[in-house]
Image (cartoon, rainbow, N blue to C red):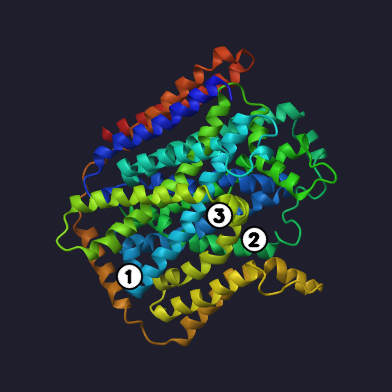
Amino acid sequence: MHIADWIILIAYLAGTVAIGVVLGRKIRSTSDLFAAGGASPWWASGLSGFMTMFSANTFVVWGGMAYQHGLVAIMVNLCYGVAALLAGYTVAGKWKKLGIKTPAEFVERRFGKGALHFYTWSMMIYRLVGCAGALYAIAILTVAVTRGENAASAVQGMPPELVTAILIFGAVVVIYTVIGGLWAVLMTDVIQFIVLNLAVIFVIPLILMDIGGLGQTIANMPEGFLALTSGSKYTWFFLFGWVAIHYFMIGAEFAFVQRYLCVPTPRDARRGTVLFGGLYLFSPFLWLLPPLLWRVQSPIPEGATEDMIRVLKEEAYIKSCTNVLPLGMVGLMMAAMFSATASTVSGQLNVFSSVLTQDIYRPLRKAMTDKHLLAAGRWFTLLLGAIISGLALCIPMMGGAEKVIISVTEMMVVPLLAPILFGLLSNRINTGTLWTTAGICIPLGLAFHFGWIATDSGTPFGNWLKNQSMTLVGVVLPLVIVFIAHLRTRKVDRHWANIEELRVNEQTAIETRIDGPADHSPARIVAWSMVVLGAAMACLIPINPEQRLIILIFAIVLAAIGAVILWGTKAETH
């Protein structure tokens, strides 16, 4: 990378930490640290939820799929939008109506303390491994860019540069999350959303100009590249399962539920989630287009080995960008990719440090002050951050980021989260349903994943079962178990009274609440960040005279977004 790229990237990382420090002044209690005091704007919650789905894995895993399979990668990501809209209209408001501080509090009240520990540790393991994969992916991209051409193929094992990148990126995320809590997570997510999408929008016309326009590109695409499904794995059945998986993830996973709890009202929770879903119905067409177009510029050679294809896939996104970006803009693209990773990691750090503090640690200590709990929450955040960084160093030994993310998601999400979501909606679901679903589906998923159950019989059905076995045991089977449990049980579960009590108490709190003046300081932080970014982009014009017009447009758009936000906050104040 050019010196200008390094300056942009380092300045962005420093600015992210600075935002955490500024917002740290708002953190006076554990409610502020873990739920933004219930005062987050609905749009910040929605954009934060949107960014929580992003990480460097988005560019490595889905970018690689777009390069290899084409349009089906966009179809897979559109599933997130469908799932988020369904969650917004069905469950987001219901979570807020409970008046809980953490989603783990609901699990304990609804299913008991044993279920709380099971879900806390199992979901924590799942999500920490996912965050480690994301941290590893952004470090791989950084090392690939700094090493130059064909760099990713040279990144074998754990070279010193990779270790350094993992530790630096991990430290930045941990620092701003520890200091600024959920406020820092939400506000940096909003900035990351703007930077990421504008950076991608910026690079697309440059790529199209480089390859001769969209019409010529389509004519040179491989056969079947624009098909909605691909091969025996990415079928309509897989897409249905992917929607179901992410409906339960967005509807019941702790990190997303935290977004429903941090806003003032149930209506705000619904609006934020619908915003998240609506954005995901068109944004994948933008940010998966670069690797898809790169397939035309750098096709897979005939006779390429699996290792060669893996390297081409991993490099596709970053090479498609570095091939056309002016000096300094590569640093911004790397900052955008880091932003996506930071969003995922910081969100999980906040939600699990919240659970460990409020629901695991607090009951073990008597007469504990909120100041003591606040300190404990920050120490838990540091500990979890260290664990994620350590796991990231082990990802190569776990089979690589793509294998880890897709397999673990298919295997664990619905078996773990379906009983929670149905427990929110149905008074018949009991603790036995929870243990039965997880106890049957997760071991079966492991058996299929590791090949302990033979599925390739050489027949069409056997081949189909081999490719769709994880969807069957990870989505269909847990739903069948939960539905059967709901239908065969006629009596109300004994824990349901705890949920009814929560709803009554929260309704009383809403009716007696006196709303104070709106807090516009987070929005102003976002606005001034956009203005500063716009000014930084304008400084790149002298070193990129041939592309000065497009850089100037980009700088003006960033500054204009900041100005509009500032004007909006002043208008609301008056």
- Looking at this view, is 492 or 232 the one in front? 232
Q: Residue drawn 59% across and 33% down?
A: 201
Q: Residue drawn 72% across and 37% down?
A: 294
Marks 1 and 3 close (CB-CB < 8 Å)? no
- Looking at this view, is 442 or 25 the one in front? 442
- Give the side of residue 559 with respect to residue 309, left or right: left
Q: Secondary structure at mark 3?
A: helix
Residue carrying label 1: 108
Question: Residue 206: where, in percent of width, then height?
Answer: 66, 27
The alpha-carbon separation of the residues under discs 3 and 2 comes to 10 Å
- Looking at this view, is 468 or 369 the one in front? 369
Dot 3 or dot 2, earlier in sequence: 3
The alpha-carbon separation of the residues under discs 1 and 3 comes to 28 Å
Q: Nearer the viewer, mark 1 or mark 2?
A: 1
- Amino acid carrying label 1: it is Glu
Dot 1 or dot 3, earlier in sequence: 3
- Amino acid carrying label 3: it is Tyr
Q: Residues within 10 Å of mark 3 (few under 14, many from 20)?
A: many
- Amino acid carrying label 2: it is Leu
Q: Nearer the viewer, mark 1 or mark 3?
A: 1
Extreme residue in the left direction: 367
457 over 235 or under it: above or below: below
Residue carrying label 3: 80
Q: Secondary structure at mark 1?
A: helix
Residue carrying label 2: 239
Answer yes or no: is residue 82 visible.
yes
- Looking at this view, is 554 or 365 the one in front? 365
